[in-house]
Image (spheres, rainbow, N blue to C red):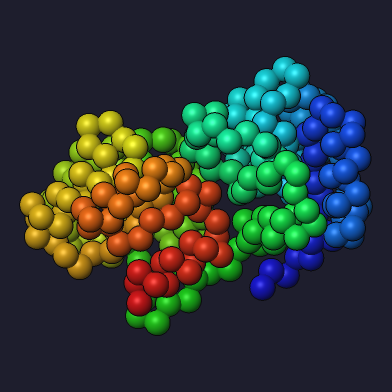
Amino acid sequence: MSQIDISELSILLIEPSSTQQKIILRLLEQEGISSIETVNSGAEALESIKSYPPDLIISSLYLPDMTATELLGSIKNDHEKTTIPFVLISSETNFSALDPILQSGIVAILPKPFNAEHLTQVLKTSLEFIDPKEINLEHYEAENIRILLVDDSLMARKHITRVLHNMGINKITTANDGKEGADIFGGNSDDFDLIITDYNMPNMNGSELAQYIRKDLGNTFIPILMVTSETNEAVLNQAQLAGVSKIFDKHFEPNKAKEALSELLS
């Protein structure tokens, strides 16, 4: 469990609607949180973060001057602030609208409307980013786990790498797409304990990478964890048939990630 209490969090809330602001503030205050700054736009948020970086950012998707995706991109360009957890509040269901911000490595999406239980769970997840604990495995020491991370999104690679580092896992080799991942693994298959891969990538997607490893290389034992925002059941089923060991949501939340790694490396 985290040593930080939810009530100790400092939160930046970015919400242009005064009505929505009041609703969210009330729920946050019910959690005992008193350090909350509210702003209406992305520009105001960037100024606030520059002066007083919060523990957690909660933002609507559509702001008057930019989207949350653009805001998160600006925040991540500032290396000193790339570790601030970011929670999106949105009623958006369109995959093409949500996929860019999912690729950027947000903690969670809170639907509109959401209740106190949803908020509590998201706040607990955020604490895992802020005050992480190392992973404990029966057969591995965290510092000895060797991972090949394959994703064409730089932001996604940074996000997943940060979560892994917080678990005590530092031996991470990255590849920019499936083809590069296949080349790296094909020449050094004994150098890795786990592969983490995206699905949608140029040159070779995650399913094709899994199929190459299982059939062409004949490696049936290395765990392959697919981290993807893909929701098409047919596509995901095909990935499992190709040899993917487990499919994981693109949020890559620390608690769930630890559970997945514990299962795959047991």
Q: Residue at x 60, y 29 (%)?
A: 69
Residue 95 falls left or right of residue 116 = left
Is residue 56 visible in this depiction of the protein? Answer: yes
Report how many numbered discs are placed on residues in the image: 0
Q: Residue at x 89, y 34 (%)?
A: 19
Q: Quadrant of the N terminus?
A: bottom right
Residue 65 pos. (x, y %): 72, 17
Is residue 184 visible in this depiction of the protein? Answer: no
Residue 259 falls left or right of residue 239 = right
Q: Nearer the viewer, residue 81 or 223?
A: 223
Residue 259 pos. (x, y %): 48, 69
Query: In the figure, 153 relative to 118: above or below?
Result: above
- Asked which quadrant contains residue 86, the reply is top right
Residue 126 pos. (x, y %): 67, 55
Q: Nearer the viewer, residue 13 or 141?
A: 13
Residue 228 pos. (x, y %): 41, 46
Residue reaching furthest to the front: 234
Q: Nearer the viewer, residue 2 or 122?
A: 122
Q: Nearer the viewer, residue 79 or 35?
A: 35
Q: Residue at x 62, y 56 (%)?
A: 129
Residue 22 falls left or right of residue 99 = right
Q: Residue at x 49, y 66 (%)?
A: 258
Residue reaching furthest to the bottom: 138
- Asked which quadrant contains residue 208, the reply is top left
Q: Quadrant of the C terminus?
A: bottom left
